[in-house]
Image (cartoon, rainbow, N blue to C red):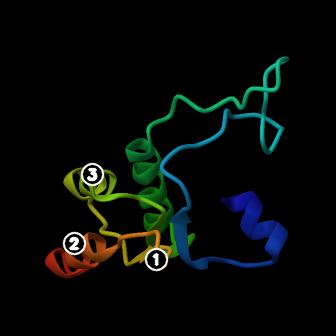
Amino acid sequence: MKTTLKDLGLDFIDVYMIHWPFAYKEGDELFPKDSSGKVLYSDVDYVETWGAMEECVTLGLTKSLGLSNFNTDQINRILASCTIKPVNLQVTIGFIFSVVILFLLYEIFNM
């Protein structure tokens, strides 16, 4: 996070978000693949990532945290373990995507 802030010329960001409930394997490649072209995913759980992001709030590197593309079970896992609740939930709304339950969850937990 400190490297990103330095690259952007910023002291902090307003909202730091997890865009997907999974991550790619750590390393220098943005989208790492094995020799057969299969995408390599990280073994780090997004709940662990959330905990590290909470530390960024404590250090003043970001003011708040958010989620994107998480389903209700995944959101509940974050809420069950977090000390800082998400301030936003980015979702795609369209005919194919049913997000009513996400909005209800938003209301229940005052996110």
Q: Looking at the picture, how far across and down is residue 65, in whole percent?
A: 45, 70
Give the amino acid at mark 2.
Leu
Element under label 1?
loop
38, above or below 77, in the image: above
Which three-letter amino acid code belongs to the residue tagged 3?
Asp
Horizontal relation, residue 12 to residue 109: left or right: right
- In the image, is residue 68 above or below residue 90? above
Which sits in the foreground, 94 or 47? Answer: 94
Residue to which mark 2 is pinned: 105
Residue furthest toward the front?
95
Q: Are marks 1 and 3 in contact (CB under 8 Å)?
A: no
Residue extending furthest toward the left:
108
Of the 4 image quadrants, the one containing the N terminus is bottom right
Q: Residue at x 20, y 81 (%)?
A: 110
CA–CA distance between discs 2 and 1? 20 Å
Q: Position of residue 106 (x, y in %)?
A: 25, 77
Within 10 Å of the Cα at label 3, are there few (<14), some (14-19), or many (20+) other Cα atoms? few
On the image, the x and y values in percent for residue 96 come to 47, 69
Place residue 8 in its image quadrant: bottom right
Q: Could you tell me if the residues under marks 2 and 1 are in contact, i.e. CB atoms within 8 Å?
A: no
Identify the residue at horizontal 24%, vertical 70% (top origin): 101
Looking at marks 2 and 1 on the same chain, the residue that comes earlier in the sequence is marked by: 1
Residue wearing tag 1: 95
**Crowd rating for badge 2 (residues with CA inside 10 Å; few <14, some 14–19, many 20+):** some
Lower sequence index among marks 1 and 3? 3
**Quarter-wise, where is residue 19 in the image?**
bottom right
The residue identified by callout 3 is 73
**Point 57% across, 70% down: residue:** 61
**Quadrant containing the C terminus in the rendered view:** bottom left
What's under tag 1, amino acid-wise?
Answer: Phe
Q: Residue at x 49, y 78 (%)?
A: 94
